[in-house]
Amino acid sequence: MQKVKTAVVGCGMISGIYLKNLKDLFHIIDLVAVGNRTPGPAQERAQALGIRAMTIDQIAEDPGIELVVNLTPAFAHYDLIKKMLLAGKHVYTEKTMTVEVDQARELVALADEKGLYLGVAPDTVLGAGLQTARRALDTDMIGAVTSGLAVVNRNQALNAEHFTFLRGQGGSLPFDVGVYYVGALLSLLGPVRAIRAFGAPAPLHAPEFLFANGDAQPWRIPGCNVVSAALQFECGALVSVLFDGNTIGATQHHLTLFGTRGILRVGDPDSFNGPVSLIYADQPEAPLPFTHGYDGVNTLQPSPYDHYGHRGVGVAEMAYAIRAGRKNRCSKEYGLHCLEVLAGMEEAATTGKTVEPQSRFEMKPLAPGHYSSMFGGALRADAEASLVE
Ligand SMILES: NC(=O)c1ccc[n+]([C@@H]2O[C@H](COP(=O)([O-])OP(=O)(O)OC[C@H]3O[C@@H](n4cnc5c(N)ncnc54)[C@H](O)[C@@H]3O)[C@@H](O)[C@H]2O)c1
């Protein structure tokens, strides 16, 4: 199968693991170039990887580049995605697709009009943990899902001292981190029919980390930084969601689905290997072995970015979809629905009304039985085969 010539735009924190995985892990990807708003970081990365550093315009104009991976901050996504789609490139973007739902709808329509692929993170939904959970549901291990609970907390204002882009639109905890929980729920339960919610804003934050701040001005993360929501899924499940960015950074993540015959507990959806366990009446809780690869454990040359796991698997799965002419799993419709749910929670909280997302999506599970490693992690195995169809 012909490899897909790919360029990455955005050379910040998350680019380390993407570049490593896209260069070395996925046979379908031919990573040829890297770009950034400012040229220095792109030149550094390009030199280390033996690829080209290009400007954003050069990437857009290069007829050889088929796919652009967008690793810029969320508020910059719309302009870059639109530019690359207009230039005839397929695009895969980090979350969230945009910060405004209308912009995301426009990009989905543009990609459709041009017959181009637009893929959207989080791709942790293709990881071993969430694919195992999906298989447990698809094979009817807990019966019909009646309800669920999704919780995550952080001190988002403190985090925003380090990650300055979190101070802008799309930086609230529900958008920045809640998106992993919403993405996981969507991948397990399908589309959301209706949303009700309460919310609270972030406090005005006076910088605490003197070493991290040139400017001492206080700022406020926009939007609701705490959301307590009820999601009614089309499948009938009612899920309680609590995202609290106004508390401490000792993250308590919960993702539990209650079914007519059992309970499924799912690990951190911001990772590729959150443990999955099963609870049946009057039985001890039992861990489920992973049925899939992409478990976040890197068996190649170790690097400082390895804790970010198998990020980039959504890019590779989309590259196979491009070659096969089939739908990709982390699709633009999935990305749009994620954003509609996140924005819908905020809208429901601020208006007191019930919000109904307009978009719909489908996400097929990956084929089970393909793993990332063999011989106890000593050798790489054939997980990539699960991305082909
Ligand atoms: N940091 C994480 O842990 C993490 C994890 C998963 C996903 N993400 C997502 O990945 C994306 C990037 O995150 P990050 O942490 O690497 O951010 P970052 O701020 O560390 O890096 C962003 C990079 O993009 C460049 N950039 C900004 N605007 C640009 C533009 N218009 N055109 C080209 N380059 C531009 C910046 O110069 C910088 O090099 C975000 O969407 C974020 O939500 C981050």
Image: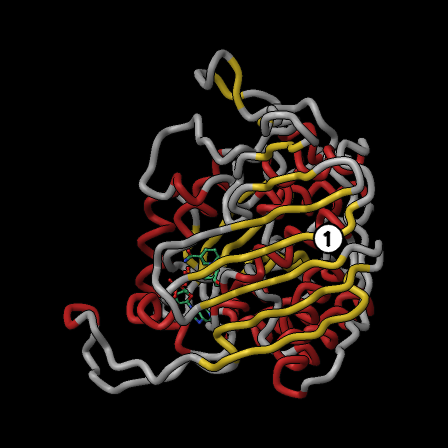
User: 270 left or right of 163?
Assistant: right
Q: Position of residue 330 (x, y in %)?
A: 69, 52
222 w.r.t. 295: above or below: below
267 w.r.t. 74: above or below: above
Q: Position of residue 27 (x, y in %)?
A: 59, 33
The residue at the point 73 percent across, 77 percent down is 106
335 w.r.t. 214: above or below: above
User: 359 left or right of 152?
Assistant: right
* Mark 1: C-beta under 8 Å from nearest atom of ligand 1: no
Total numbered labels placed on residues in the image? 1
Q: Quadrant of residue 306?
A: top left
- Ligand 1 in which quarter: bottom left
Amino acid type for the residue under numbered disc 1: Ser
Q: Position of residue 112 (x, y in %)?
A: 81, 66
Is residue 381 at least partly visible in the picture? yes
Q: Quadrant of residue 161?
A: bottom left
241 w.r.t. 147: above or below: below
Is residue 5 at least partly visible in the picture? no
Instruction: Give the residue at mark 1.
Output: 147
Most foreground residue, 75 or 113: 75
Residue projecting furthest to the front: 282
Most foreground residue, 83 or 309: 309
Most foreground residue, 230 or 309: 230
Q: Position of residue 188 (x, y in %)?
A: 72, 47
The residue at the point 54 percent across, 42 percent down is 267
The residue at the point 47 percent across, 67 percent down is 244
Q: Quadrant of the C terminus?
A: top right
Q: Quadrant of residue 381?
A: top right
User: 281 left or right of 301?
Assistant: right
Task: Please tell me whether mark 1 sits on a helix, a strand or a loop.
Answer: strand
Q: Quadrant of the N terminus?
A: top right
The residue at the point 54 percent across, 57 percent down is 151
